[in-house]
Image: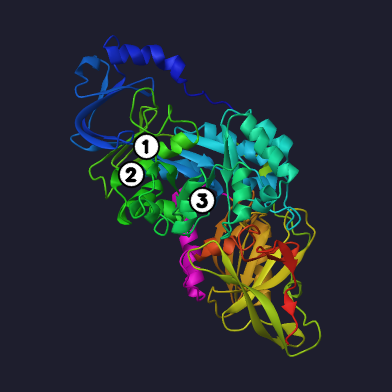
Amino acid sequence: MSSKPFPSWPDSAPDLIATAAGRRPADLVVRGGIWVNVHSREILPDHDIAITAGRIACVVSDASYCIGPETQIIEANGRYMIPGLCDAHMHIESGMLTPAEFARAVIPHGTTSMFTDPHEIANVLGLEGVRLMHDEALLQPVNIFTQMPSCAPSAPGLETTGHEITPDDVAEAMSWPGIIGLGEMMNFPGVAQADPKMLAEIAATQNAGKTVGGHYASPDLGPDFAAYVAGGPADDHEGTCEADAIARVRQGMRSMMRLGSAWYDVESQITAVTEKGLDPRNFILCTDDCHSGTLVNDGHMNRVVRHAIACGCDPVVALQMATLNTATHFGLEREIGSLTPGRRADMILTSDLSALPIELVLARGQVVAEQGQIQVDCPHLHWPDTARNTVHLGHALTDQDFEIPSPDGSNAVKANVIGVVENQAPTKALQVDLPVHDGLVEGTGDVCQIALVERHRATGGVTNAFVSGFGYSGNMAMASTVAHDSHHMIVVGTDRAQMALAANRLAEVGGGITIFREGKELALVELPIAGLMSDSPATQVAAKAQAMVDAMVACGCSLNNAYMQHSLLALVVIPELRISDLGLIDVRSFKKIPLLEPIS
């Protein structure tokens, strides 16, 4: 990897001072705009911003004294000048794109800084996968800061990943130039119980003076929550209601409120600010997970800010939550997050502070997008073959691999069933009486089969269970090698033969998502890098993803962003019920439970 690091403020200070004093012409002046100051929460008309060496030299009412013969002029024409938007917590892999293609997709939406946790690829490729993500991130024309993943596996003893992350890995990564902190600490029971491995990772991060990311996915705000906060995580994005947001802020954490492709947690929590009047500087907006279709068709952080405003938040407060608050949280307030001297010249010009059309985007003093069109290159890393050949099933699967025998020959059984909840990460633990035909347990009504197929070590292992909520009908199956967080393969279907077809197809193409119905492939999204990402342009991936969504609908699914629900069914750190390669996991107790129960 070769990338020229962006000059530090001390390196640029002589030129910045000279420009601000009028001794050196600015490289660029944005003239005649409305300065949205997120430090003072003011809207100040008739200001100019002078930029030198990619940083802001001064913001003044008249920067004509900074203009020389070679100075580039951008006329703001009375538009609002706002800081480039920051995504405080996100997973690039959820966009099904590499860092370069993700950057290309979000730059026109005004995102100029991202704080990414590549724990998806860490589960598949380990520290080497994190390094590849980190290295490509540093090549981009915008700021992509990497958090070192903390939990691979996310719940030790409850799943088997392709690789594990150790405290030594964390300590090593803390010296890398783009590492900003520790990724979300998902093993919240481990922290609450003072697990030595978890505390060693937190200690390595804090010793490096960096931020520990949180993930407390439990409604219990009692002693376990108190113990988790005492363990060191500095933020949390798993809140789903106002009480969650308030509890986190009161305990000194930053409450990260997310609006992703499937997570709609802003509206239910922002009332802590808009109605309860809590200090908004302790609240941060983020996306967490956005797939390519959302990025191409709906936006990124601009979508989140608009949504917060629509929920009653003052526009400048919403902008604080997506700029300065994020920068402050990660110790970067002197680098990004505001339009003030010394900061990187990351800026948006917009004609409407509420509708937020993204008309011009600057990053590091360079025009990177205009009127929705990217204006710069986003360099790619060479991804080695080891990152592309990651789907190993051991043998071609048949319908017999997906059979669930009745344990006692009875005509009906009681099954523990995963219940999908629309627009939320948690599931419900259901119990449903299911019929038995020819000695095999079958789904009925809205209950269909789910299987987790081992794909890292070619063990040939298949864990079978049942799931409710997708609404599928007919003989169909959907398979995905995106299976948070262990990223084996999740197959959901109403017919075992279709499930085998779908699984074998993904082994053939090296990973991705596919849907079969009656022996015919309805959609395919190839994700050859780690079975998680494509290095094709976002528009191409989004078109295939849309075909996948359309195929889900054609098979009877009406859930909003149901693919995201599908991909999270193996996430054994979010209640209530999940599937892993080791069996069915009750995340309320963090114990494996039987699939079938005797009917009393």
SS state under label 1:
loop
Question: Residue 237 shows which numbered tag?
Answer: 3
Q: x%, y% of residue 182?
A: 60, 39
Residue 35 falls left or right of residue 116: left
Name which residue lies at 48% across and 60% down. 262
* Above or below, 117 relative to 435: above
Residue beneath the point at 40% across and 53% down: 272
Q: Nearer the viewer, residue 205 or 403?
A: 205
Look at the numbered discs 3 and 2 and tell me whether their residues touch, using CB distance below 8 Å. no
- Quadrant assignment, res 86: top left
Number of other residues with Cα within 10 Å of mark 3, as a class: few under 14, some 14 to 19, many 20 or more: many
Q: How many marks?
A: 3
Q: Position of residue 481 (x, y in %)?
A: 63, 58
Q: What crowding class fits label 1: few (fewer than 14 Cα within 10 Å), some (14-19), or many (20 or more)?
A: many
Residue closest to the far top: 23
Identify the residue at image location x=66%, y=44%: 387
Quadrant in the picture for residue 321: top left
Type of amino acid under label 3: His
**Three-letter code, disc 2:** Val
Q: Residue at x 74, y 79 (%)?
A: 597
Tag of residue 84: 1
Quarter of the figure that contains the C terminus = bottom right
Q: Is residue 120 visible?
A: no
Residue 317 marker: 2
Above or below: residue 373 compared with residue 313? above
Count residues near mark 2 (Cα–Cα under 10 Å), then give few for <14, some for 14-19, many for 20+. Answer: many
Residue kind at label 1, given as amino acid type: Gly
Q: First in sequence: mark 1 or mark 3?
A: 1
Q: Is residue 542 magenta?
A: yes
Q: Are marks 1 and 2 in contact (CB under 8 Å)?
A: no
Range of residues picked out in magenta = 533-561
